Each structure stands twice: as C-alpha cells, then as structure tokens.
Image: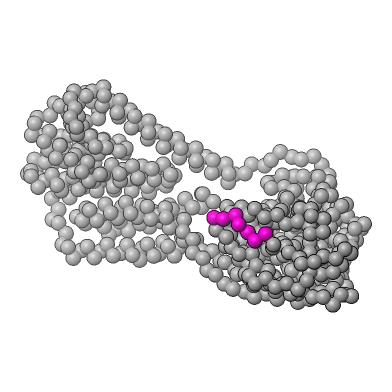
C-alpha cells in the first residue's frame, strides 16, 4: 500500500534528520554534510522498498482417508442467511479516497514547481540587459538577481564591479559543484512527501549547506567582514526552488559559520554514527517475507480399487516469466467409467507459496481431463454492503474479513493457473440468488466466519469447518468436493479443523447446481481465531490448502 510505504519513508527521514541536527549540522565538514543529506534522503526511500525473504521448508504428508469415512456434525454456531433484495450503492472506500487525494496533491505540487521555473525563465527574458555563456546581467527592477539558475549566473547590473565579482565567485561554486541536482532531488521529494514537515526542514538544511560551501570558497579571496556586510546588504527572501541565491534570509547561521574555527579532522569519526542509524532503520522498516516451501506428499485410495497414487506435486516459484509446467494436472490413463485412479506417478518438486510475485500472470489453464472443459472455481465472499453480518469485539465486520480472504485465495489461484471467479470483489451487497454459480462452473465455495458459541458452551469452536447441505439433490458430489477440501485442510498447523463435514440447510448450498460448500474460517468472536486469520501468511497457507483440495477433487 502506497500510504504505508510513505509513512515508513517519513519515519526513516525523521530518524536521519534528528541524527543530522544533533550530531553533524554544527560541523564544518560541509562536503561530508552534503553527501549525508543527499544520500540519506535517497536511502529513506529505498529501505521501505526492500524485502528480505526467509525460507522455511515444511514436509506435509496427507495420509489416506476413505470416502466412506465422511460423517456429519449437525451442530451449527450460526447460519448465514440473507433475504434476497436489491443491491445497494457502493460504500465509500476511504483508503482509496485518501490515496487519490494524496496523488492529486503531489501531482499539483510537481506541476506548480514546473510552472514556477517557467516564470523564472520568463522573468529573466523580460529584465535581461546582457548575456554571455554563463552570466546574465539583469536590471535592478528584476526580482530574480544575484543568484544561479541551473548553469546560469544572474547578477544585478546596478552593483559595483567589485561586488559583482564577489557574487560571481560565490555563484560559480553553486554552478561548478552542481548544487542544482541536490535542489531538484529534494524538491521532488517534497512533492512526494508534502504531508511530512520534516522534508521542508531537510530542504532548508540542504540550502544552508550549499551556502556554507560557496561562502567557504569565497572568503579565501576576500575579507570576512566585508563579505558579511555584502551578505546583509543583498539579503533577499528564499524562494525554495532551484535557484541558489547569493544572500538569502535568515543569515545568522551563515555568518556564524564564516567566523567559526574549522573542526579538527579527528571529528570526522562522528560520521560513523550513520552505520548504526541505517542498520536500525533497515531492521525496523525493511519488509520481511516468510516463504514456506512445502513439500507435499499426497496419498489417495478408494474402496474396491487396490490402485494407489503417491504424488509429490510441485509448483515452482517463478519470477518475470509466464512459463509454468502445463502438466500440473496430469493423468496417464483415465478409464471410461471414471472410477480408476491416476496411474502411479511421482513428480519431485516444492510448493513455494510466496515465491511467485503477485504481478506474475501464469498462462496455464487447468481442464477436466474427461470432458476437456475448463475448470472454474466460483468463490463467494459472504455478506457485503449493508449486510455486514456480525462484528468482532474490536469492531471488524465479517463482510470485510470474508472479502480479504477470497481476494487472497484468488491471488494464490492465479499463481497456480487455477481459474477462480469471485461473486463480489468489493464491498457490495448481492442477493443470494445472484451469487449462485452457473452450471458451467466446476465447484462453488462460500467463505464465512462463525460468530456465536454453541448453546451451553462457554467457549465457541475457534477452528475451521466445512459445511454441505443434504437438501441438495446432488449431495453426493458436494460431499466428495467437501471431503477433498476437508482432507487438505486437516494438514493445517496452528488452527483446529473440525474432522467431519457439517450439514446445514443453507440457501446457497441447497440451490446450487454444482458441488457447493461453505467454509467457516474460524470464529470472529475468538481472539485466537481472529489473530490467526488476520495474518496474511496464514490466509495464504489456507488458500493453497483449499486449492489443493479443489485440484484433488477434479482428479477424482
């Protein structure tokens, strides 16, 4: 999220600025200070953009579970039913609105800076008296004078020759040392971090440092007292743009530095403080990504058939590529009655949940091997819009948790080439009948959270549950689908999974024309459950286990 990134940049900037003001700003090593101010400004933008990966290998073995072992638990904590109704207008997404407002202001400031530079060039043309390769003489009426603008030095033609020479000497330092680059960088940063007051103090310190450098070179050929008097006589307000003025208010720091005794070289050791400061910022603000490499061994078996499949299936994490092994769903033989299993097949690999970047698109398509029809999983985020369902003790609405879960599931499906269609991808109320999947879908999942304890129970069930409806005419296929999902979820670590399918007379399960289940991702009233599923890493693990179950169902 761009706003989180900018907040991290702002805190880094504050740490570096505090270090400069407390330890470095009073030193006379102006060149080192210039390096510090420019480099740490850039580092502040780099650190929050970095990501460190920590890889951990986990081996999971799914033991055989017979289809005949399916059982039902009829107890239900809550039934999610919504009366059909018309859709309501979209609610306001304040986070997106804030992001748009930020971008609008940042863009407006950037345009303003360009406009102001255009005005400076126009003013120079209007008041110019004479011009050489590097010097422009302007009339006394010009507001832009006794300064440098990119590689041009602008001097007031009414000044006496000796004073013009001093101005020329001073401004030549700005031009020769390319101070305009620093000003362009810090002004761009000010457009990006316009909301952070530290960036304006930072820009002021860079301006001051430029003047210290130019003054240091100028007083080598002139008396300090005369030079200080000239600074006072020609002082003008600072405009904060890319112009380096000869004398800008306030002047106290510049005159103090003119008369300050240079610091000893030994004091340069103070700059070593930069190393621990950068280390602290890296530790605090570099992104950490947990990459779980899960080696999965799946063993399937069926009653009445002695065949067995042992499969080690691997989806290799790819970067900047759309090449994915097309035989992720592969079978050597399929019998005409569809009851034989896949022939024994071992594929050595590792499932990397996070290795494939979110922006990678995998051009793979999983198809039903018997019908050659594309496999489509329809996923529903329960509730939405005015139907917020229940809320956690901390005020988080179930509808928002459901939406976040299905969005992450779709991201993981895209990485694996599994087509997932969402019934809603925003906070919108959709009637139950409009959520039902079309007959061309392969299967249907509705994501919810439990919200109440069972009667006479002090503690609600905190874990994951899979629900089907016996009222559906095609319950056999729904059971098979639910069984595969449940079997996959049983390998989940850190959260309890109910070991049997539940039966509930829910509208979406009862009326669906394709195999349909509801998955309850824990209990919204449980702190443990809410903390577990608030962790994106856990949601991605659960999403991949659900996709494993869907893939296993399509092979059966």
Is residue 330 shown in magenta? no
In the picture shown, does residue 410 fall above or below 158?
Answer: below
Is residue 322 shown in magenta? yes
Q: The C terminus lies in which quarter of the figure?
A: bottom right
Which residue shows up at 57% across the image and 72% down it?
56
Q: How is the image coloured?
A: one colour
Decide which of 511, 383 is in the foreground and name it: 511
Give the percent coordinates (x, y) of residue 476: 89, 63
Which residue shows up at 19% across the image and 29% down it?
136
* Residue 465 visible in the picture: no
Give the percent coordinates (x, y) of residue 26: 23, 55
Which residue shows up at 72% across the image and 44% down it?
428
- In which quarter of the view is residue 277 placed? bottom left
Which residue shows up at 60% across the image and 57% down it?
323
- In which quarter of the view is residue 62 placed? bottom right
- In which quarter of the view is residue 342 placed? bottom right
The total of numbered circles placed on residues is 0
Magenta portion: prevailing SS class: loop
In the picture shown, does residue 258 fall above or below 109?
Answer: below
Is 97 positioned to the left or the right of 441 in the image? left
Decide which of 121, 318 is in the foreground and name it: 318
Give the percent coordinates (x, y) of residue 362: 63, 54
* Residue 378 visible in the picture: yes
Residue bounds of the magenta highlight = 320-326
Is 479 positioned to the left or the right of 270 in the image? right
Give the percent coordinates (x, y) of residue 340: 84, 69
In the picture shown, does residue 169 fall above or below 205?
Answer: above
């Amino acid at each position: 999220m761009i706003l989180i990134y900018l907040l991290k940049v702002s805190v880094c900037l504050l740490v570096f600025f505090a270090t400069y003001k407390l330890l470095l700003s009073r030193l006379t090593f102006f060149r080192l200070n210039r390096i510090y101010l420019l480099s740490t400004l850039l580092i502040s933008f780099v650190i929050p953009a970095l990501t460190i990966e920590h890889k951990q290998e986990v081996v999971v073995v799914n033991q055989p579970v017979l289809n005949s072992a399916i059982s039902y638990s009829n107890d239900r904590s809550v039934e999610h039913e919504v009366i059909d109704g018309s859709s309501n207008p979209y609610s306001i997404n304040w986070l997106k609105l804030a992001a748009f407002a930020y971008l609008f202001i940042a863009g407006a400031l950037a345009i303003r800076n360009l406009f102001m530079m255009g005005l400076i060039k126009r003013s120079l043309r209007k008041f110019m008296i004479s011009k050489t390769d590097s010097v422009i003489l302007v009339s006394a009426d010009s507001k832009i004078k006794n300064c440098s603008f990119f590689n041009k030095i602008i001097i007031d033609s009414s000044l006496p020759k000796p004073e013009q020479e001093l101005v020329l000497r001073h401004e030549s330092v700005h031009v020769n040392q390319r101070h305009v680059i620093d000003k362009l960088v810090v002004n761009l940063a000010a457009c990006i971090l316009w909301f952070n007051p530290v960036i304006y103090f930072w820009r002021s310190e860079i301006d001051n440092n430029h003047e210290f450098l130019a003054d240091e070179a100028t007083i080598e050929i002139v008396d300090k007292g005369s030079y200080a008097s000239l600074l006072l006589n020609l002082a003008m307000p600072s405009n904060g743009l890319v112009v380096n003025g000869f004398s800008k208010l306030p002047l106290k720091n510049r005159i103090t530095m003119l008369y300050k005794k240079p610091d000893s070289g030994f004091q340069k050791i103070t700059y070593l403080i930069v190393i621990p400061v950068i280390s602290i910022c890296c530790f605090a603000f570099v992104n950490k990504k947990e990459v779980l490499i899960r080696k999965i061994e799946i063993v399937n078996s069926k009653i009445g058939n002695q065949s067995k499949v042992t499969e080690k299936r691997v989806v290799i994490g790819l970067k900047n590529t759309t090449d994915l092994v097309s035989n992720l769903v592969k079978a050597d033989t399929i019998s005409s009655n569809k009851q034989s299993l896949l022939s024994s097949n071992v594929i050595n690999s590792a499932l990397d949940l996070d290795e494939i970047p979110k922006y990678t698109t995998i051009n793979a398509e999983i198809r039903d091997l018997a019908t050659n029809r594309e496999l489509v999983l329809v996923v529903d985020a329960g509730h939405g819009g005015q139907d917020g369902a229940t809320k956690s003790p901390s005020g988080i609405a179930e509808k928002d948790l459901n939406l976040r879960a299905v969005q992450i599931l779709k991201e993981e499906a895209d990485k694996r080439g599994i087509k997932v269609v969402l019934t809603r991808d925003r906070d919108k109320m959709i009637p139950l009948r409009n959520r039902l999947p079309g007959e061309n879908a392969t299967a249907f999942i509705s994501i919810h959270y439990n919200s109440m304890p069972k009667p006479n129970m002090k503690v609600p069930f905190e874990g994951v549950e899979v629900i089907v409806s016996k009222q559906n005419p095609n319950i056999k296929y729904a059971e098979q689908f639910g069984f595969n999902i449940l079997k996959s979820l049983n390998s989940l670590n850190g959260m309890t999974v109910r070991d049997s399918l539940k039966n509930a007379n829910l509208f979406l399960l009862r009326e669906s024309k394709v195999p349909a289940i509801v998955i309850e991702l824990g209990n919204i009233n449980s702190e443990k459950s809410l903390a577990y599923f608030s962790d994106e890493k856990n949601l991605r693990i659960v999403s991949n286990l659900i996709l494993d179950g869907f893939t296993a169902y399509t092979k059966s």
